[in-house]
Image (tube, rainbow, N blue to C red):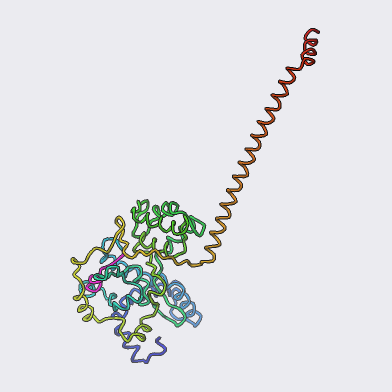
Amino acid sequence: NISAMSSAQVHRMRRFIDVLFPYWNATKTWLRGVVQDVAPDRTTMVFSDVAQIVEAVSERYGSQSDQDCQDIQDKLVLLEEGGTGRVKLRDFYESVGSRGFWNFRENLEYLKHAGAIDDSDPSAPRVIIPNYLQLPSNCLVPSDYYAICCMDRCESMMAHLEREIQAPYATAERIIHIVASLPSDSVPANRTLPDGLVRKLEEVAAHHGGVVPLHGRLFAQWMHFAYPRECVYPHISNTTGGMSQAEWESATGLNSSLSKAEVAAFAETLPAVDDALPCGPGEGDVCMGMWVLEEELVDVARWHAARAAQEWQRASAARQVLGLAALVALIVSSAATIRDFVSKALAAVQDDPVAKSKRQKVVAV
């Protein structure tokens, strides 16, 4: 907060701004564009002009800031382990010195606290790309009231699924059909999902009596493995924390970020990249060492209500089918009874001598 800083602190920050915030030059270029858009060709401004510019910056900066997030993701993808959405921890830290990736200096313990680490193989921890993007350390906090963080790259896929399904749940077959044709920035359309991924979704459906709830932990987990670069891995509640870097430092007494020298020294203690085992137990070509069959629904009461309504509709439809079948059976039975009655009546008439005599007289006439 500049208003709480001394003049000397502000001048020092401006002198080192390119080190403290390497995206500063791009941000200045963007800001000049906003000024030109809101107050074009002004040599002087009144208060209302400045107020309009500040309002426009506040409204538009989220998309501009996300370009910085995209830069972070691009760097992580360069280090990624074979399309898994994960980066071996040694690659992550060594990139600070070898590639100049200044971002990647968080303390491992803080990364664990924030849920950005895949430790399904404790001997070779890995950074989970989408979880790392959502770290508080990647947010800008201009006010005590809000923060500007990386956009959720999974949101557009979930929105597409909701539009297509238009229900809080769907069968595994329906979801697989939609997801197979749904592309992302890193996944092509019209792909064949790995057999292991299909089996996991069928497992979720079996867990819920034949359908998959869209707004629960298990489906979010499945989406993470379907889109490992975009969709966050959902840890079980209370196994990770949500503290900011400052809060974590206050609670633990540790630094949330390491110096370059500390990063280099720590990287040397990690398994060599070539020695690290693959990312863990896989299902086909999908690495699923972190798969946990434990559900957490967003709205349990509404989910049970929706399922009860579905069961009632199913039972109602079954009753209608049974009623129709009974009606058809009644009609068929009645028709058979009438047919037998008519046949017997005709036979009785034919055997009646009086009736025969009358028919003979009619013929004679």
Please identify the quarter of the rendering in which residue 207 is found.
Answer: bottom left
Residue 225: image x %, image y %?
35, 61
- Which quadrant of the figure has residue 35? bottom left
Horizontally, residue 320 falls left or right of residue 121, namely: right
In the picture, the quarter occupied by the C terminus is: top right
Q: Position of residue 351 (x, y in %)?
A: 73, 17
Foreground of the two, 188 or 38: 188
Q: Nearer the viewer, residue 267 or 203?
A: 203
Q: Which corner quadrant holds the N terminus?
A: bottom left
**Picture residue at 34% right of the left edge, 73% below the top:** 26
**Which residue is situated farthest in the top direction here?**
364
Q: Is residue 185 left or right of residue 96?
A: right
Residue at (73, 21) in percent of width and height:
348
The residue sitting at 62% across, 38% down in the picture is 329
Residue located at (40% from left, 72% from top): 33
Q: Main secondary structure of the magenta part?
A: helix
**Which range of residues does the magenta coloring cover?**
85-94
283 versus 14 height, above or below: above
Image coords of residue 322 (percent x, y): 60, 45
Of the pair 307 and 333, the residue shown nearer to us: 333
